[in-house]
Image: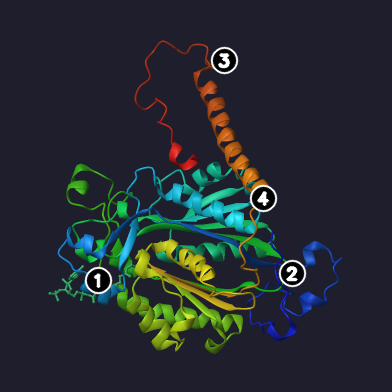
Amino acid sequence: MAEIKQPSAMTQSTTNGAHPPGSEPGIAAERPPDAPSAHRPRYAHIVGWGHHVPGKVITNQELEQIVDTNDEWIRSRTGIAERHVAADPKETSASLAVAAARKALEVADVPASKIDLIICSTTTPEHIFPATACLIQDALGAHNAGAFDLSAACSGFVYGLAMARGHILAGDAEYVLVIGTETLSRIVDWTDRETCILFGDGAGAVLVAASEVPGGIMSVDLGSDGSGGNNLILPAGGSAMPTSLETVSSGMHYVKMDGKAVFRFATRVMASSTRKVLERAGYTTDEVDLVVPHQANIRIIQNSVLNQLKIPAEKVFVNLEKYGNTSTASIPIALCEAIEAGKLEPGYKVVFVGFGAGLTWAACAIDWRTPVEKPETGWWKNTRRQATYSAAAARSMWRRAVRWVYEVLPDPEAPGRDESREKTPAEAPVKESTPERVRE
Ligand code: ACO
């Protein structure tokens, strides 16, 4: 793993609740290196990042052929010019996530076997269960990791970072993989011009690591207001409205949105949540070097971050013109592109802020310490990496084979069982749930 840079005395932050007890910057640096590990301060740093989007691009002009809209309206009302969509059925939320996660592990130079926890934020999981995070765990060969999905819509990635930080500061995990992944094109009504123009598909991942170097994720703010749940909702497919012929024929398995209500809510919480995390980290808005906001609509970013917080446009990273709103994937995708564009360096104070269905909102303030140069990738590292992917696939197949053997062997504890009887549909094993596409 790349060495996280110690902050100089000049750049150390003040604190008001942003650190675990007894771990204030300054005290940390003076603590003897042989202090028992339980008493040493811990910080949660992002040490790896990666993103992946499907190859197929749909431009505004192409949308003009599908619904009653036009390029000028979409650009001026949203800032979006095109979006990537998962046109290949093999591209799913898990397959995009695995590609992004592998890149994040590569940047961090950490093997999947070291991951303690995988948090997958998504509104388009592969299934209601099992968790998409578990399919990702299997494909990565992260055999020491716990895994769960997180549902907080577009705020989910920052919620995931908050969970990762909590596990690391509590001493429960050394490495947590946080992923935001979406295939929104699969739940968008392509005849509804008010929603289909907005969304795109993609995935972003970061590896969060424990470190004694002061810095990293300094403060978080998580919020929710369920009274606005109906403003942005996928009505059918859950226990409130199970899928039926009727729900499908009435399009209740598509996204429904009150755009104006979401817009008003978003502009309010983006500013207030950013203020909260800055205050908790002890930063002023002037000190912020980079804001990576949720990429939903350029007017929301202008109204909140630029106009209300008075943070200048050159400090706010925007890439929504290329991707549209990729929901929970938008912040990690933008983070990766900000790094590629040279907008981030060690010592920078960074804010991530998002909002989404729920309604939810979330922000975090980061004292960025990780070097951002692309790591060297020699043939040996590449070969070793490929070998670990193959080993993960082989391990997964072996475990399936063992399960299959147990399935076909007669159960010695059920001597009276009639083996010749044909299985009822309820008894028949469910078709493979981890599809090839995820493991490829
Ligand atoms: N093309 C052309 N005209 C359109 C389109 C379109 N695609 N969509 C709507 N219009 C029309 C409307 O019918 C309306 O016409 P009318 O005046 O004759 O009635 C007119 O344009 C204006 O419509 P508004 O809804 O007032 O447009 P608005 O400026 O509010 O922009 C938008 C709509 C872009 C949806 C905006 O409200 C918005 O971005 N809201 C936030 C949405 C959002 O961010 N959602 C994601 C949340 S994150 C998550 O959890 C996934």
Which of the marked residues, 4 or 1, is nearer the chain's N terminus? 1
Label 3: which secondary element: loop
- Determine if residue 180 is in view: no
Label 1: which secondary element: helix
Check disc 3 and report the residue beneath it: 412
Amino acid beneath label 3: Pro
User: Which mark is in front, 4 or 1?
Assistant: 1
Left or right of residue 175, residue 99 in this image: left
Check disc 4 and report the residue beneath it: 114
Distance from Cα at disc 2 to Cα at disc 1: 49 Å
Left or right of residue 13, residue 298 in this image: left
Residue 319, position as x, y percentages in the image: 41, 70
Check disc 2 and report the residue beneath it: 41
Amino acid beneath label 2: Pro
Q: Nearer the viewer, residue 94 or 18?
A: 94
Residue 333, position as x, y percentages in the image: 46, 63
Which of the marked residues, 2 or 1, is nearer the chain's N terminus? 2
Label 2: which secondary element: loop
Distance from Cα at disc 3 to Cα at disc 1: 65 Å
Q: Nearer the viewer, residue 361 or 187?
A: 187
User: Which mark is in front, 4 or 3?
Assistant: 4
Q: Residues within 10 Å of mark 3 (few under 14, many from 20)?
A: few
Numbered circle sitting on residue 96: none
Give the answer, above or below, for where 217 lies relative to 113.
Answer: below
Label 4: which secondary element: helix
